[in-house]
Image (spheres, helix red, strand yellow):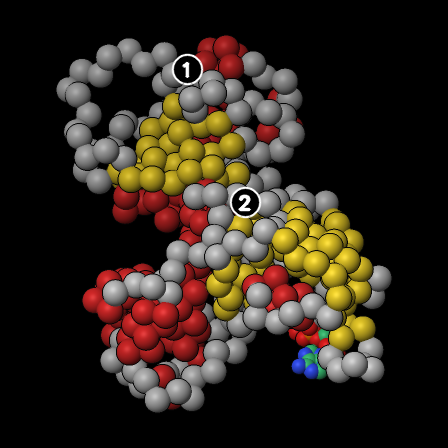
Amino acid sequence: MRLDGVGRRYGARGPWVLRNIDLDLPRRSLVRVEGHNGSGKSTLLRIVAGIDAPSKGRITGRPRSAYVPERFPAALPFTAVGYLTHLGRIHGLRGPAAARRATDWLERFGAGGHARTPLAELSKGTSQKVALTQALLADPELLVLDEAWTGLDPAARDVLDRTVAERVAAGGTVVFVDHDPRRLAGAADARYRVSGDGLDRLPAGAGTGTDARPADAGTGIRPADVETGARPADVATDARSAHNGALPTGPRVIIEAEAPGAAGHPTPRDLTGLAELPGRPYVTRGPDGGTTVRLAVAAAHSDALLRALLAAHPPWHIRAVAPAPPSPPPAAPAPDENRYP
Ligand SMILES: Nc1ncnc2c1ncn2[C@@H]1O[C@H](COP(=O)(O)OP(=O)(O)OP(=O)(O)O)[C@@H](O)[C@H]1O
């Protein structure tokens, strides 16, 4: 999707809130929007989401979009699941499928117990979970999050972090504003600051004024710039002595991640660090044999592993997350030349 020369003002004679906005929103990207209070971030997000129209300029290539505002209008005469089923039907789902998806998402966010509570009786945090569920129900290609983490409990914030990573890995676009500079810090593919004259593009990897790191951030991942230029052959040789977890049995998730930084290839230190992350994943080089790695981890640890990858400095780019085929590993695995070590 592209915005060209977009401007917005409220009222024919009102001041321009946004002007000269040129913005490219490619697939498979996470885009952060920043700016001081009142600079027009929410106005821009509403235009990106398609719930407000620009006063001038052009928007092309709009994908199927969904929007989560900071405040969810809760004074509607529905229960949570009744409201979500209704919206699911509007999005073309059959009633039972809509109710099932709504219930699944509410449970994932830890609000399954409130499915039958009237919207007007929900707490701010649970209302926010309903707002997230309505946005995710229809599997949007573009997800727009305006301070959507506000009011969520830590577990639900983690679920939202992971959901964002999954959507981007699946080829979607996520655009977000958040007052917390540590939110998905460094994970954005692009960062923009709204200013009176348009949008300023900021360095993508840098944090937003803080080096703070979540307490549960991963251990052992080193920035790729410590050993720039490592070749895949070096990786295999140098890493031999390091631990690599056994291929987990039972339900597994495969995460494909791209090495952080500009170095290109994961270094031996990167690989050692990966094998020590939550769930002690089984690490192999990705199909391109170069910049990506594949991590097989027990499904129960996949959330924690994704969090650690995203919280690393610099963060790994998550390229794909998928359940592994259910077959158990062979008793004596054949030599796998891609396996590390
Ligand atoms: N519906 C509206 N009618 C009139 N003016 C509006 C409307 N919505 C926003 N504005 C004005 O547009 C300007 C930008 O508001 P907006 O909410 O987009 O900024 P923001 O950067 O998201 O602010 P904050 O960080 O405080 O949430 C503000 O001056 C605001 O008062």
Work out whether residue 218 or residue 285 is closer to the camera in this orientation and state it: 285
- The relative height of residue 86 versus residue 105 in the rendered view (above or below) is below
The answer to whether 80 appears left or right of 96 in the picture is right
Q: Label 2 belongs to which residue?
A: 27
Viewer-closest of 280 and 132: 132
Q: For numbered disc 1, what is the local secondary structure?
A: loop
The residue that appears at 48% across and 27% down in the rendered structure is 292
Residue type at the position of mark 2: Arg
Graded by Cα atoms within 10 Å as few (under 14), some (14 to 19) or many (20 or more), the crowding at tag 1 reads: few
Question: What amino acid is at disc 1?
Answer: Arg
Q: Residue at x 79, y 81 (%)?
A: 12
Residue in view at x 53 percent, y 25 percent: 291
Where is residue 341? Give x, y as percent. Answer: 39, 17
Residue drawn at x 47%, y 20% is: 288
Which of disc 2 and disc 1 is earlier in sequence?
A: 2
Location of residue 51 by image quarter: bottom right
Q: Residues within 10 Å of mark 2 (few under 14, many from 20)?
A: some
